[in-house]
Image (cartoon, grey):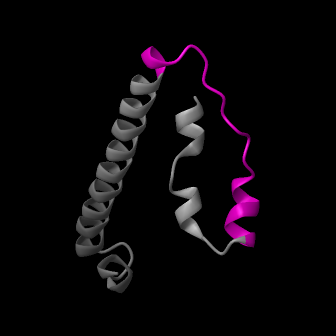
Amino acid sequence: RILSRRKKGSARWNKQRLVVAKLHEKVANRRMNFLHHKSKELAPNFDAVAIEDLNMKGMSQALHFGKSVHDNGWGMFTT
């Protein structure tokens, strides 16, 4: 919100852009860490793991979840 109020291209806009980028990086790192821990927990405990092929775009539109469905990182978990 703060970034959207800044004049694009100004020094304060660039400073705030870096703050927002750091926050996004922290969220991405936390998500990667969580997914890595969960997959590492599943791998030694089970011989086979079955993953359902979900239509995430359809789920977000039909069930009115919005961005929360896209924010879970299902693709990263399957890889």
Q: Where residue 47 sits in the image (x, y, percent)?
A: 56, 13
Classify 32 as above or below 59: above
Q: Nearer the viewer, residue 44 or 75?
A: 44
Which residue is located at x 51 percent, y 52 percent? Answer: 72
Q: How many marks?
A: 0
- Residue 34 part of the magenta segment: no
Which residue is located at x 27 percent, y 59 percent? Answer: 18
- Specify whether 63 is left or right of 24: right
Classify 11 as above or below 36: below
Q: Where residue 22 sits in the image (x, y, percent)?
A: 27, 54
Classify 10 as above or below 34: below
Question: Is the N terminus in the top left, top right, bottom left or bottom right quadrant?
Answer: bottom left
Which residue is located at x 52 percent, y 18 percent? Answer: 46
Which residue is located at x 51 percent, y 57 percent? Answer: 71
Q: Where residue 4 sits in the image (x, y, percent)?
A: 38, 81
Question: Is the C terminus in the top left, top right, bottom left or bottom right quadrant?
Answer: top right
- Quadrant of the rendered structure where residue 57 is? bottom right
- Residue 44 part of the magenta segment: yes
Q: Nearer the viewer, residue 40 or 70?
A: 40
Looking at the rendering, the stretch of residues picked out in magenta corresponds to 43-62
- Specify whether 14 is left or right of 43: left
Q: Where residue 44 sits in the image (x, y, percent)?
A: 43, 15
- Quadrant of the rendered structure where residue 7 is? bottom left
- Quadrant of the rendered structure where residue 31 is? top left
Q: Residue furthest bottom?
A: 5
